[in-house]
Structure formats: structure tokens, C-alpha cells
Amino acid sequence: MESPASAAAAAAAAAAAAVAASTAEAPPPNYVSPLSTRYASAGMRANFADLTRFRLWRKLWLALATAEAELGLEISPAQLAALRDAADVDMALAASYERKLRHDVMAHVHALGDQAPEARPIIHLGATSCFVTDNSEVLQMRAALDLLLPTLWAAVSRLADFAMEHKDVATLAYTHFQPAQPTTVGKRACMWLQDLVEDGLRLEEVRAGLRLRGVKGTTGTQASFLALFDGDHAKVAALDAKVTEAMGFGTSVWRVTGQTYTRKQDFTVVAALAGVGQSAAKMANDIRLLAHMKEVEEPFGKEQIGSSAMAYKRNPMRCERINALSRFLQSLLMNPAETASTQWLERSLDDSANRRLAVTEAFLTTDAILQLVLNVSSGLVVHKKVVAKHLAEELPFMATETILMAAVRAGGDRQTLHENIRQHSMAAGARIKEEGLGNDLLDRIGADPAFAPIHDRLAELCDPQQFVGRAPQQVDEFVGGYVRGLLADRNVDGSAEGDVRI
């Protein structure tokens, strides 16, 4: 019979062997961007995946070969069929070629040639690398905008609902983060809403204005294609138009390029994305301030933990993440700005690595922000009693002019009443700040014989709705008269949910 000691030793040896085996099977440590692991949606991650990019290259090569054949080059139907029916991108095969050739586009040309040998002689015919890289990146940007816009308009829809629901809820406004003339919770939300609406319209403009690089050759002169078509300028122009049309861009192609399309297009796109970050950050900051005052809170899960040490905490982590990501997004704008301004002559390659990072991460970050904005705007909680309490603490001071005018109209002396209110206000303010007690200004006025003619009207004169101006009507006009129409024009589905995994 095995002794306890030998059994323990055997168990320890087995555990060590298991650890060794699992360590041997584990992949080596490898950094992956948190935008992929934590923040961006599955759709956006897929759009900017390498496989998506390389599949687009193949679509471009097919469109090019098809147009060249239609315009008279000797490309057979069998060669086109081989391109069209080729097996999916063999990433391992392409990677093996790139290690040898040190050129990503040519690696995929060779890999596709191996998978479609009949088409090998006509793949990439007349083209330069930027034919596939630049054009595919514009296609990816357009697809990314198509992912962002529904999320943004869904968030607009949720905020519009929130604004209408709370259009009459009077609340303190703040300037300099000091109490100011009241507004309503819904009117404040309309400020967030208006910024996001402007972003949505701007993104739509940017999408509509996107242009392909087209078929331009190595330095933008189309010389290689002119040689292929024996000097026929009309056919070269037709080739450019056919490929642009085949890729779904109609006539939206850059008329003039160097080797690349102008990098100002990237700046235009990223600037619009950064605008989303600005709007989202403003909204998130406001909610964080309101959460501190316990007036408005972002959604908080039943099992969510606010702090590892302070178990009672309800930190506004979603809004804080919006602010963090927005800061990063806005910092990315410097990259396309610098890239556009520092390109040499017809092109220099110092744009390439920067664009792979900046443009892609700008879209992934914007996507992550909008997922959070949609999530937060779908579950905002308003603590109306706290809102009313804070308003009641300050409203007596704001109502003093109304009270003064009413007392004068009831026969009082304006100068005497003004001095009395001033003294009562100073005393009430000292009581609040020096003793930590509540605002008793109305009690003081109610006990002052000089105001006897309006004592029974003090509550009426201090009704919060008397001090919000046209805030409720502005919400009706803005949301009902404008935003709802925009949403209807776009058939916005109000059931969308933000993809917030963490």
C-alpha cells in the first residue's frame, strides 16, 4: 500500500507536470490593444482586421482585371474566373512570402498567384501598391462610418426620449459651476443632444465626400496604364471610372493624385471622429459632476463594484471611460494633420506606419465611445427629490427680485424692501456657510411685516416653474420639431443597445 508521503509526492509531481504542459502549450506573451480586447465592438474590430483588408485587395484586383478585359486587354474569362473563385486568403502563405520579399503587397500577389495559378500573369497588372492599399483603406473607412452612424443616431434617439421625459423637471443651472438661473433636466440634455446631432450630420457629410484613389499608377500620371492601352487616353480614363464604379463609389474618385490620394482626406475623416469625442466628453463630464451631487447617475449594475476598498462607492466609470477614450481620440488628430503636411512631393513612406495606427485607432476609439454613449444615454437615472432639494436650497435667493417686485406692487416702498431683503439674504447666507444649516430666507421674509401683503403668495412666487423660462418649450421645439424628423428620415431603430463588455 502506498504511503501518504509517497502519494503526496506523486500528486506534487503530477501537478508540476500539468503546469509544465500547460506552459508549453500556452502562446508566448503578446501585446494586444485594449481597443480590441476591451472596448471596440466586434463589427468594428472585424472591419479593420488584416483579413478584411486583404480580402478587399483581392476585390480590387478582380475589379481592375475585369475592367482591363472589358477595355480590350488580353485577359481571358478563365483568368477572371480564377480570380473570382480563388480560395480565401491564405494568411500563413502570404506571411511566408512577406518574410522573404519584405513587401506586403507583393507577398499577397504571390500568394494569390499560387492559389489561382491561371490568373497569376495578370494579377496587379499596371498597378502600384497604393492601388490596393489606399483604395482598400477608403473602403474600410466608409464601412466604419456605416457602423458608427447607426450607433450615434441610436444614442440621439435615446437622449431625445430622455430630454422629453424630463423637459419639465426644474433644476439648478450652473455657470462657473456656481448656482445660476434654473433650467430643466431635459433642456440640459438637449445641449448634449445638439452636439451629437451635429456630429451625426458631419459624419454623413464626410461619408458622402469620401473619394477613392482610383487607378493612377506609380506617381499619379497613369503612365503604366497608358502604355498598356497603347496610348489610348480615353481607355485609361474609362479604366479609372470603371474600377471606381465597380467598388461602389460611383464617380467619387480623386481627379489628381501623386502615388497616394491626398492625405488631407484622412485629416477630414479623423477630425469628424474627434468631434464625436468632444461631444461625448462634454456629456460625460456633466454627468460626472451631477453624479457627485447625486442628481443624475449613469447605469450601475446590480453586482457592479465601485471600489475594491470602499464598498459603498458608485463610481461613474462608464463616463470616466468616455472621457479617457475621448482624450486619446483627440490626441490622434495631430497624426493625420502632420502626415498631410509632411508628405514629400509625390509620396514618402513615412505616412504608412503612422496611418495604420492613427486612422484605424481613431475609428476603433470612436466606436468604443459611441457604444458607451448609447449605453449611458439608455439608462440615465434622475433623482428628482435630490434635484428639487438642491433647487430649493438656492431658489429663495434667485426669487428675491420677483418677491421684491410683488411687494412693491402691493404698495411697499422699493428702497426699504430692497434693504430688508439684502439684510435677510446676508443673514441666511451666513447661516448656510458658517453654521451649516438650511436656507431660511423665505422664513425671514415671511416674518417681516414689511412683506405682510404678499406673505400668502411666497410659495407661489417661488414656484420653480416660474424661473425656467422657455426651457420646456425649447425641448419641445428642438426634439419634436427637429430631432424627431432627423430620426424619422433615417429610420432609426430605438431598440439598439450599446456593446459595453467591461
Image (cartoon, grey):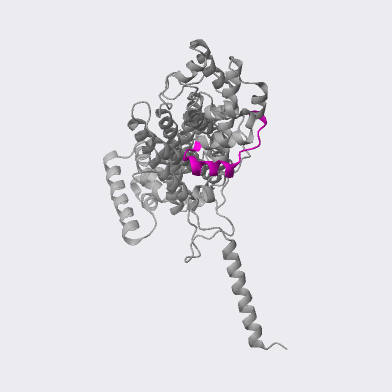
Quarter that holds the N terminus: bottom right
Residue displayed at 37% across by 31% down:
340
Q: Nearer the viewer, residue 292 or 205?
A: 205
- Horizontal side, residue 364 vs residue 327: left or right: right
Q: Nearer the viewer, residue 311 or 40?
A: 40
On the question of residue 369 being in view, the answer is no
Q: Position of residue 25 (x, y in %)?
A: 59, 61
Q: Nearer the viewer, residue 133 or 442?
A: 133
On the question of residue 6 being in view, the answer is yes
Residue 94 colored magenta?
yes
Residue 179 colored magenta?
no
- Please tell me how many numbered marks the rendered image carries: 0
**Magenta span covers which residues?**
83-104
Provide the major secondary structure of the magenta segment: helix
Q: Position of residue 325 (x, y in %)?
A: 45, 46
The correct choice, above or below, for 87 with respect to 311 in the image is above
Residue displayed at 58% across by 42% down:
93
Q: Nearer the viewer, residue 186 or 220?
A: 220
Residue farthest to the right, as pictured = 1
Asked which quadrant contains residue 282, the reply is top left
Q: Position of residue 342 (x, y in %)?
A: 33, 32
- Horizontal side, residue 11 vs residue 405: left or right: right
The correct choice, above or below, for 251 with respect to 490 in the image is above
Q: Position of residue 436 (x, y in %)?
A: 36, 60
Residue displayed at 60% across by 65% down:
22
